[in-house]
Image (tube, grey):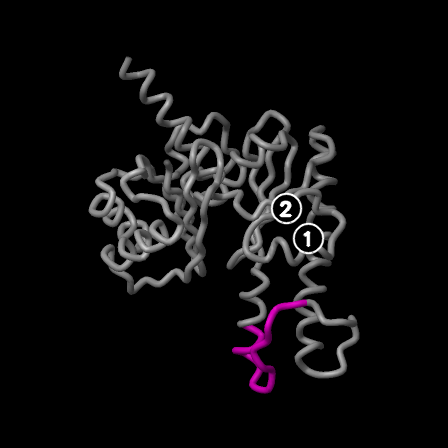
């Protein structure tokens, strides 16, 4: 079994794969104050509750955009599983070209989204990841990573609005019954969430026009991330919603790298 870990700025997601099947997953808050022992104990508890013997975990793959937590989870993997984890980065032989001035600056989660999205749906492809930031990753029809767009995330926008406006409360993020709010909370929910849908549809339309101009054709649109299910229900341009896409990418990249290493040893 493979333990795949996606460390984000707001949440960390764990997933256990048996071959290509995700058999269990958990989401927790990303906290910089955690030690490798706290993380290791938590992971073992998750595995026990899912009736997965921790000794069955034979590999660990990590996608991280939080360097301090990368070190902690690496130490956890070595101490609690006796495994040197595979850290996802552009330095690995991913099998496609990264059209970025500095490929090392592309987040591991974005690389995972590109790999898993292309593996499942082909290209051209637009992957929209609704996390701390909302990212748009664009994949060519030949699988190359063309680049993308980074915008404020849905929850980030809500928190910042509350923080900067003294009389605006912190609100739960769900769509209100009507667009025209009749109280402060529903007005904020409408602005944040319907605004996010309009931003999504406007940005995707721009990206589609750019892809057509480049001769790529019309891209498939895939949503992932914490708010993907909620927003997909309110936008017809999202063709597929795969919340586990980053974890899937960790698995695919892990399998490719290990297979290549075996060939080199033989």
Count of marks placed on residues: 2
- Looking at the rendering, the stretch of residues picked out in magenta corresponds to 160-174
Cβ atoms under marks 1 and 2 closer than 8 Å: yes
Q: Residues within 10 Å of mark 1 (few under 14, many from 20)?
A: some
Q: Which residue lies at the image location 64% right of the left edge and 30% below the top edge?
A: 123
Q: Quadrant of residue 39?
A: bottom left
Residue 142 coordinates in the image, percent (x, y): 60, 25
Task: Identify the residue position indicated by label 2 in the image.
Answer: 241
Q: Is residue 162 above or below residue 25?
A: below
Pick the front one: 184 or 240: 240
Pick the front one: 81 or 35: 81
Extreme-top residue of the structure: 266
Q: Quadrant of residue 55?
A: top left
Task: Identify the residue position indicated by label 1 in the image.
Answer: 232
Q: Which residue lies at the image location 32% right of the left edge and 36% below the top edge?
A: 59
Q: Which residue lies at the image location 50% right of the left edge and 28% below the top edge?
A: 97
Local secondary structure at mark 2:
strand
Does the magenta segment cover residue 161? yes
Q: CA distance from mark 1 to mark 2?
A: 7 Å
């Amino acid at each position: 079994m493979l333990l795949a870990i996606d460390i984000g700025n707001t949440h960390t997601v764990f997933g256990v794969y048996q071959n290509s099947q995700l058999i269990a997953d958990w989401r927790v808050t990303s906290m910089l104050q955690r030690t490798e022992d706290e993380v290791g104990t938590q992971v073992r508890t998750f595995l026990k509750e899912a009736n997965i013997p921790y000794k069955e975990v034979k590999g660990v793959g990590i996608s991280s955009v939080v360097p301090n937590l990368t070190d902690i989870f690496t130490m956890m993997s070595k101490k609690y599983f006796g495994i040197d984890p595979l850290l996802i980065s552009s330095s690995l032989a991913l099998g496609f070209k990264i059209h970025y001035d500095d490929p090392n600056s592309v987040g591991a989660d974005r690389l995972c989204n590109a790999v898993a999205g292309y593996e499942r749906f082909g290209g051209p492809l637009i992957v929209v990841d609704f996390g701390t930031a909302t990212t748009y990753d664009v994949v060519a029809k030949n699988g190359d990573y063309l680049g993308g767009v980074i915008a404020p995330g849905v929850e980030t926008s809500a928190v910042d609005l509350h923080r900067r406006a003294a009389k605006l409360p912190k609100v739960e993020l769900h769509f209100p019954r009507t667009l025209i709010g009749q109280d402060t909370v529903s007005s904020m929910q409408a602005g944040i969430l319907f605004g996010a849908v309009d931003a999504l549809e406007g940005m995707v339309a721009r990206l589609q026009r750019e892809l057509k101009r480049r001769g790529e054709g019309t891209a498939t649109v895939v949503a992932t991330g914490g708010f993907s299910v909620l927003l997909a229900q309110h936008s017809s341009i999202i063709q597929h919603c795969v919340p586990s896409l980053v974890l899937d990418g960790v698995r695919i990249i892990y399998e490719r790298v290990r297979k290549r290493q075996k060939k080199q040893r033989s």
